Amino acid sequence: MKKLKELKKKLMAMLTSVAMVVGMVAGGLGLAPMAAYADTVTYFTIDGYDATGTVTYPIGNENVILTFDQSRVDNDGKVSITNDQASTIVAALNEAVTNVSGFNSETMQAYFEASDGFKGNLTCTEGTFAGDFGLPVGLAITFHIAAKDNNSGGGEGGGQAGGNSQAHVTMSSDGGDWHGQPCVRENYNYYEDMSIDWNCQAQNSYRLVSLFVNNNNEWRSGAGFEEDGQAVNERDIYYDAKDDPSTVDLTFKFNFGYRPYGDDPVIKINNTDYHVNQYVDLNTKAGWLDALIFDRNVDFGGLAFTIPNVPANIDGQGIAQLNIVCNFRPSNFEECYIANYGWGGTDPNEDTYIGNSTLTVYSVQYPADLGGQTYSFSTIQTEAGYTEAQKSAQYVLYESNDRGSGMLIPVGSIVTMGVAPNFGYQVTEFTINNRSITRNDFGTSDDVAVFTFEVTSGNYHVGARVDEVDNEVATDSASGISAGAVEIGAGDSSMSIGSALLEVEDVTVSEEQVANFANAAGEYEVSSYVDISLFNKVCKGTTEDAWITPVNSLSSQATISLALNEDVSGKEVVIVHELSDGTYEVIPTEYISEYNAIVFETSSFSNYAIALRDGTPTPADQDSQDSQDNQEGQQSGSGNKSFNDKYMDTLSDLSDYIGELGVNSDTTIVYSGGDSIPEFVMAKLKDCPNVSIEFSYTYEGVKYDVLITGKRMAELYDETIPWYGPLWLAQYFSR
């Protein structure tokens, strides 16, 4: 008999619950508050690190020598960080580096590089590194020192491939309302100060304008707003000259949610006015969408247009002189025809986080005024993430949700997306841009775990609350049964997502069935007949509605416990099962005396009879169960894991028991003493990655349920903390 102790716990919870599941769609179950998620722990790698604590970078005829604090760098050169923000990663680098010698900023460059090619440049002043950039979340990141080349870029990102010609570019705005201030991040609240509903983009955006010369080098500029004054920035960049080197093609790419300023926008280049409307139609939806790009190389998408054959204004040294004045502002809803649909990633603090589930984007259907065509994932995704035929729906897609994904698509498009929760979890709420939405704000398909979203202007970041849940048993329609619990065998294909719902109901059988049940029961007397039905339940983004799929049979055994109203303490009990082929089988049961409950196993679901005879019921053998639990996993509302639960109510027992466990032990301990755990217990737990402490307590009138894992504790353990208190435990381990 599998999972007996776990069933006993769940059965007790069901017996003491004030709300039982009634009917096929269960609602009203009190869910625990959303877990307090910890920061995603990740790392970057030091290029060339060899575990000696000193790295030498030969640059030409010079050597740069970096000395590292070996307590901050592991033998593989990895430095831990809590997230991918520049402030965090640069601070971690400076903590790890204890000395820098030989660095020459004129001939050398330091930078972080992500595995998709994105580069974040660093300065180094008196041995301290600095930089302001955003690195793509979840990518492999490496720190480098190398010889400075002509295409190291500028502003807030690195450049693309270099070229054989040089340009000195000055980018500025001419003052007045709503001009960009290049390369400065400010907290200027344009929502309040402009008294206009500018909602296509969040505050504090960066890299608002990129400039490409002959489309082979980039300078990113713009990182905030100011109301008046003039902002100027300049940089030398390199490009490949055209056949006629006296002219250049200048491509301007605006960050999503921004546009050139003015009804008739003008970009001034070397005192010559270039009217933007000659190159892109910003006054119609079709023109706007035609100019839309999503360029992963520059890490943002938006409007793009090229001004061709601009005089290069080459000086006596052969350097093109380009003085550019470009004003821009955020787009408002009336003119924002695109949506930034984002989802996925591993950081629970992001508004696109959807954990404990598998995400799939099936299709995007364009609005009727753009043809109403539907693009499938396979149709629109190419190696480059871009096709000319679908220019207005550019994707950065990953097939799993361990990477943040996004796409720019027309407003009014309908996205069909699968969100399949792992078994033991349910999607109970969706959010858009971290705001809860109602069931009326999204649709559901006839297909299980498939949702539809009609996107609106601006950021449309889809996140979800995915709660851990228990399997459910509904017994209100069974007069002889007061409660129940069910566990499903691990890896059963019929129960791979959501949770199990077991319904037990009184059933009326025919005279022929009565005779057949009695004949199969033999010396046992049938006391009642019940229909036991199993369903796979998957919530429709709310606890009030769900996909309910009948499951007639399983590939493995389900373990069912039923608490009986009739006292059977002096009886032997068996279950008689009517199989789908019309035959009958007798299933032995075990008895849990404290709950007057029987436990049995089955893999198919139909009519059953409970049959009794005088004698002593077979007690559930707890000792034999322990050894079997060590070998077998079960799929339950708590997820997939091997159970060998132990019950402890004193700290000394808890400490002694954990101390006896080996590093490979896979055990869940149920602890019921107090509301805190001392350091000496946590010191042992951190060395047992597969050991967990299940712990419920009440603190200041609030009930908390936590699951403290050895693996996570190894990351959080601090020997200077004498006691890990109730609020700390709730913050990091809430269930």
Image: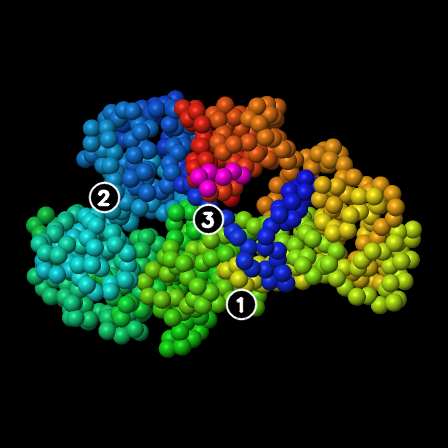
Q: Which segment did they paint magenta?
A: 696-701
The 10 Å Cα crowd at callout 3, few under 14, some 14 to 19, many 20 or more, is: few
Q: How far apart are marks 1 and 2 (CA)?
A: 53 Å
Q: Is residue 699 magenta?
A: yes
Q: Name the residue under label 1.
A: 445
Q: Nearer the viewer, residue 415 or 103?
A: 415
Q: Position of residue 202 (x, y in %)?
A: 28, 56
Q: Closer to the camera, 220 or 572?
A: 572
- Residue 614 against residue 144 in the figure, above or below: below
Q: Which mark is residue 150?
A: 2
Q: Position of residue 249 (x, y in %)?
A: 21, 61
Identify residue type, mark 2: Asn
Q: Pointers 1 and 2 in contact (CB under 8 A)?
A: no
Front in this rendered view, residue 581 or 214: 581
Contact flag, marks 1 and 3 (Cβ < 8 Å): no
Q: In the image, which is nearer the foreground, mark 1 or mark 3?
A: 3
Residue 150, position as x, y percentages in the image: 23, 44
Dot 1: element: loop
- Res 242 seen here: no
Q: Residue at x 77, y 43 (%)?
A: 591
Relative placement, left or right, of 317 versus 281 is left
